Amino acid sequence: MDASISSTDERGRPPDASSAQPQPQALPPRQVYDARLQTALLRIAYKNTTASVFVHLFASLGAAYLAWPIVEVQALLILWLSAQLVLCAARLAQVARSRPIFRASAVLPLHVIRRLRIYNGAGQLIVCLVWASFTFWAVIHGTDTIRHTGLIIISALAAGATGTLAAEILVGRLYISGMLLQGSVALMLTTRPDPVIALLGVVFTLAMLVVHRNNHQVLAKSLMLRFANQDLVLNLQAEQQALAELNATLEARVSQRTTELKTLAEHDALTDVLNRTGLLRWCEQRKDQLGHDDAFAAIFIDLDRFKQINDGLGHTFGDRVLAETAGRLSDGVAPDAALCRWGGDEFVIVLSGPQDSLHDKTIALAEHIRSLVEQPMEIAGHDLSISFSAGIAFAIRTDDDISEAIHCADLAAGAAKRKGRGVTESYNCALLTEQERNLTIAQSFKSALERREFTVAFQPIVKAGSHRVECYEALCRWVSPKLGRVSPDEFIAVAEETGDIVKLGAFVLNEALARLASEDLLRHGVKVAVNVSVRQLVAPGFVEQVRSALSAQRVPPRSLVLEVTESVFDPRNRTVILTVLTALKGLGIEIHVDDFGTGYSSLSRLHEMPISALKIDKSFVQALDTHGRAIISGTTVIARDLGIEIIAEGVETERQAAQLEELGINSLQGYLFGKPSADIGQPLDDAPQAKAG
């Protein structure tokens, strides 16, 4: 085996830190002695040397004791014994010097192994020579007792060497051969040769050499198996450690991935703020940290007219605006609050605190984030400003469902949008009632159309001065068996939102034309005015729908007036609306703008549309004694220059009628001349003027 695979000594002790890590290798042939095996064998040899030294020492003392009475020159015996003592001391000293070397490393370098082997072999061979001198003297000059004692001693030492020197094959062979063969040689050189015993000595030598070789092979195999077992154990330990490290790595990766998945599951990918799941989980965790008197507050943020950004600049640009807005909101939110992208262009902020101070804290936060968000932003070369409508609601107790508070804040934000956007509204119970009613209206609307629960009322429009009825405005009314009387302000807004306004508008148009034809008002030149929403104008086939309705009721186009709102000036649908209105105008239908002055500032754009008349909103009529007079006067002057007539609605008193006629108003409408009614009056030339009430 290669020396690099060693990791323990023959006692199974771990190597020093400097030793190499074992690598799995196949067991090498028994004939190959590597540094690892040689080190282990040498260590065993040196360990056995101590016992061998003491055996030699006691054998020397015994031999000297027996030889003392018969030796002729006792000084030589003393010299021989002294040599044995010195040799034993030297060998013990060598063993002592080898111990630090063996402790220093589990595998010795080859040159160190050779040096230590030489020292050990030299000691063994010198011992053999010293005993040879005693054997020759005992066999040749000694008595039978001394002769037999010497032969027994060297035979015993040789037999013992088959075990003690099993670790050293060469030294053991030389030692055993030297010990036994010297006796055979001495027996043959004596004056009384004993060839039988000498031959037995040779045979015994061969037998001992075989035993020694077998012992050496058994020892080597044992060590090699031990090394293999140790390597196997170390490899298993290394594999277990590697597996443990792998498991630890996998656990760390699983933990990291779990954290990442949790982050992904609880955060919005675009803005990196919390999503709905993350916000609700934050609220659940926050509950455990709140005191008995603490509560939650929710701020619902809905960006104003964000759809215009997506439609005008693209959704990619809109995403960048959302990310920038989220960053500004994050800057304004304290660490003890949570920011969430609720969906689309909606964000939610949840904060908590003592109930007595939470309201003021929430209002202050709403104002602060508004100041941050409404600062001009520059994105991709475009300068723009963002505003938002916000709603605020509170969860009075911490065990209340925060989702309900967020829902209430959403309702408040919707109310803020209806009030004109860019404001913050606090929730009240009326908002929930209104929302529930709107939902009920929306659910009942479709079936109401099918059950013909809608009716049409008519309100007269009179000529200024003569007050003769020249037109009736068709107004839709709904009396529901479930809801009772539903205001047009309620169901028209719901129909606009759901898209059902298209069907409702078609119903009103057909009903109005049918009534106009049935009441025989056409020959008197009376017209009917029908309100039309932008949704109807942009719906495919609207012009053909109007033409078909006129044809079905045999009403000439000049008898129909379509009233539109100022939203027709919205640039988003300008091209489509202009095309439709031009086509209707081409049929002979008049186009009037209803509630003029309450929406878009359109005076400078009146020439862009085929408008026949403007209807001044009743709010300006009610303010005739203040600012309303100047607004109506200015509008009348501009409209007259453009060839557009002016109709004033909401006229309730004779004084208002006189003031409006003085300003040059062409037509009047209001309770002074008649409330909306299912009956259409007879506008004959001799008919009396309409009165209020």
Image: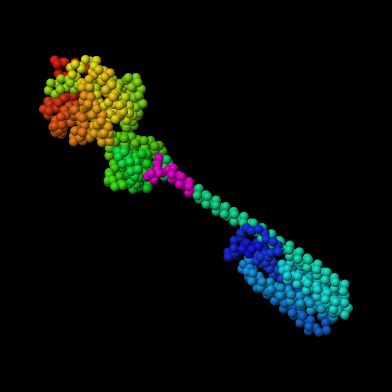
Quarter of the figure that contains the N terminus: bottom right
Image coordinates for residue 598, horizontal then vertical, percent: 22, 33
Q: Is residue 248 above or below residue 460?
A: below
- The boundaries of the magenta stretch are 255-276
Q: Is residue 671 left or right of residue 274?
A: left
In the figure, residue 488 lies in which quadrant? top left
**Relative to residue 229, is residue 501 drawn left or right?**
left
Q: Is residue 285 visible?
A: no
Residue 560: x and y, percent?
22, 22
222, above or below 183, in the image = above
Q: How many marks?
A: 0
**Which residue occupies 23% across, 32% down?**
566
Residue 168 visible: yes
| Residue 679 inside the magenta-drawn segment | no
Q: Give residue 351's quadrant in the image.
A: top left
Front in this rendered view, residue 555 or 137: 555
Outermost residue on the left side: it is 662
Q: Residue at position x 13%, y 32% from top? A: 641
- The structure residue drawn at horizontal position 71% and vertical position 71%, both measured from the top left corner, is 49
Give left or right: position of 316 versus 33.
Answer: left
Pick the front one: 630 or 392: 630
Residue 212 image point, x, y percent: 76, 66
